[in-house]
Amino acid sequence: MPENACAVRPQTATAGDPSPQTCIQVARQAAILAATAADDAMTAVCHSRTGATTRLEAVMHAAHKEAVEAERHADRAEQYADDPAMPSGAPLYCARQAVEHAVRAQSAAGVETTAASLRAELERKLTVAEYAEQESARRQQEAEQEAEERAATGMDRENRDRAARNRYLARGHVAELGWTAGHVRVMEAAESGRLYWRGGRARQAARHGVWDGGRRISRERTQALFAARFLVAVRQDDGTRTLIPSPMGQVALELARLHPAGLHRTDREAYKARFAKVRRRHKRRDDQKAAARLLPPLDSSARNLYRKPLMLAHQQHRAEREAVDRWEDEGGHCLGTGTLRPADGPVASAPVRITRTLHGLSAVRTVLW
């Protein structure tokens, strides 16, 4: 190798490396950028004031030194490309050195380091086999991460994204409900199907269907939620009215669970927050107080945007149920087609009806009367 050659011995080029012609072009462009930066530094010295001359001369010399090195490596890249005795990776190494010196020259001159963008042209391109291996490793890593997240959340990616959107939705709407934790407890009692109203009192029955006794529930909160249509009443045969969440009430409850920080600490704080919202809409003080005692409905945009995420277990159960429904809709087991669904035990006799004809054989379907 000639004297003044690159200090580090260049290695043999591998598949995917840029061609020698590309290396020469990049090295020559880097040398031009370095020389331009050195010229700019020299121009600054010529137009400088007396007090700044010393500093600008130091900048000029530093930029000029780097420009000389960039030019030298550009020349070496051309020389090595034409020399069959040199390693095939020599032009690439010299081109990279020329780019680095050009970046230093621009940095020393205080100009934009545009030479840094030349590095991308010298990056090694992956071969087809390497790209396939990289993609395989990436997919495997994504699959492992997906498995971990499914195990932690019990949801697939689509429903995790849906849950994240619901949490964002909750942060923007829960505080507007004017609820406290007590309102959430009333809604949860209604969700259990055991909240009932009798004799002017709200109670949560100890057992479903036994509308007598049980734990007392706040009468005022229950009435407010019912008046705002978060609860709806269902009359039982004995005259008892059971209270269940309305569709709007169920969405509001889900959002409140997602963002409990949006609930007010006390009923008084909740009243003040509602009063601050209605005071501009009503002129009379009594009208303001009456409006503040009412719970506002859930914003329609929240009702339309909320989508309840599905757990993986629920999705699997639904898929199994749909498979059974399809099996029954298609007539069940047909003669000559094999046993599609093993019997779980003795089957009691039941009336049957013909559902379809397949290749001259009548398929039958059990009907429970």
Image (spheres, rainbow, N blue to C red):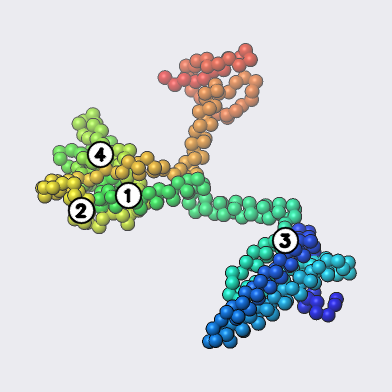
Location of residue 3 in the rendering, given as x and y in whole percent from the top left corner = 83, 80
The number of numbered discs placed on residues in the rendered structure image is 4
Cα–Cα gap, marks 4 and 1: 17 Å
Cα–Cα gap, marks 2 and 1: 16 Å
271 versus 72 height, above or below: above
Cα–Cα gap, marks 4 and 2: 22 Å
Is 171 left, or right, of 90 in this rendering? left
Front-lying residue, 187 or 279: 279
Is 229 left, or right, of 329 in this rendering? left
Dot 4 or dot 1, earlier in sequence: 1
Q: What amino acid type should be assigned to the residue bearing mark 2?
A: Ala
Location of residue 284 in the rendering, given as x and y in whole percent from the top left corner = 11, 47
Q: What amino acid type should be assigned to the residue bearing mark 1?
A: His
- Badge 1 marks a residue whose secondary structure is helix
Cα–Cα gap, marks 3 and 2: 64 Å
User: Residue shown at 58%/87% (left/top)?
Assistant: 54
Is 22 left, or right, of 212 in this rendering? right
143 versus 10 height, above or below: above
Q: What amino acid type should be assigned to the residue bearing mark 3?
A: Arg
Front-lying residue, 278 or 2: 2
For disc 2, the marked residue is 276
Q: Which mark is residue 173?
A: 1
- Badge 3 marks a residue whose secondary structure is loop
